[in-house]
Amino acid sequence: MPTNRTFTMIKPDAVIDGFTGPIIQQIEEAGYRIVAIKKVHLTPEEAGKFYEVHKERPFYGELCEYMSSNPIIPMILEKENAVADFRELIGATDPAKAAEGTIRKRFARSLSSNAIHGSDSDENAAIEGAFFFPNGN
């Protein structure tokens, strides 16, 4: 059963580029309520734990290095049909293929520096959100 919550995080490139405010504004204008938010600078070990599901993938080391390179902004968002609608709002992983007006089209640098993460399922939204917000808020 779909939930009304999803997890997102503004990635290091977008934080460093000063896009936190405009990204949050676009999220709120799309009807999302921010339930939890904070600014975090992950250690490489914390990034490794968060991305443990990708441990056997060739990009794992680079991903952990990137995600611990600068602060991130994790958030729990609430809205009806949250996960599916948010995936549409952020756009394709590759900003060159993302639809006009999506967050990645507007703010991402490249496929690997794609500005924002969005959970791909209700189950992953709960798992990912609990990593940063164990109490749900």
Image (cartoon, rainbow, N blue to C red):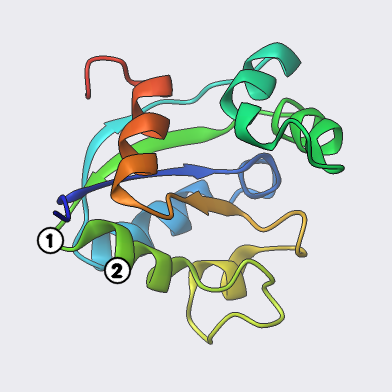
SS at circle 2: helix
Mark 2 closeness class: few <14, some 14–19, many ≥20 residues within 10 Å:
some
Point out the tag, 2 or 1, that comes first from the N-terminus: 1
- Secondary element under disc 1, as helix, strand or loop, is loop
- Above or below, 135 against 74 in this view is above
Q: In the rendered structure, which amino acid carries the disc numbered 1?
A: Glu
Residue ID at (63%, 15%): 46
> What residue did someone put label 2 on?
85
Toward the front, the furthest residue is: 56
- The foreground one among 107 and 91 is 91
Single out the residue that lies furthest toward the bottom: 100
* 68 relative position to 10: left or right: right
Residue 6 spot, x, y in % from top left: 30, 47
Q: Do the residues labelled 2 and 1 touch (CB within 8 Å)?
A: yes
State the image coordinates of residue 2 (x, y, percent, origin top left).
Answer: 17, 55
What is the quadrant of residue 107 in the picture?
bottom right
> Quarter-wise, where is residue 43 in the image?
top right
Q: In this view, does 104 lie above or below 32?
A: below
Where 109 sits versus 134, above or below?
Answer: below
Q: Position of residue 127 (x, y in %)?
A: 37, 31
Dot 1 crowding, Cα within 10 Å, few <14, some 14–19, many 20+: few
Q: What residue would you read off at disc 1?
A: 80
In percent of the image, x 84 and y 31: which residue is there? 61
Q: Residue at x 35, y 63 (%)?
A: 86
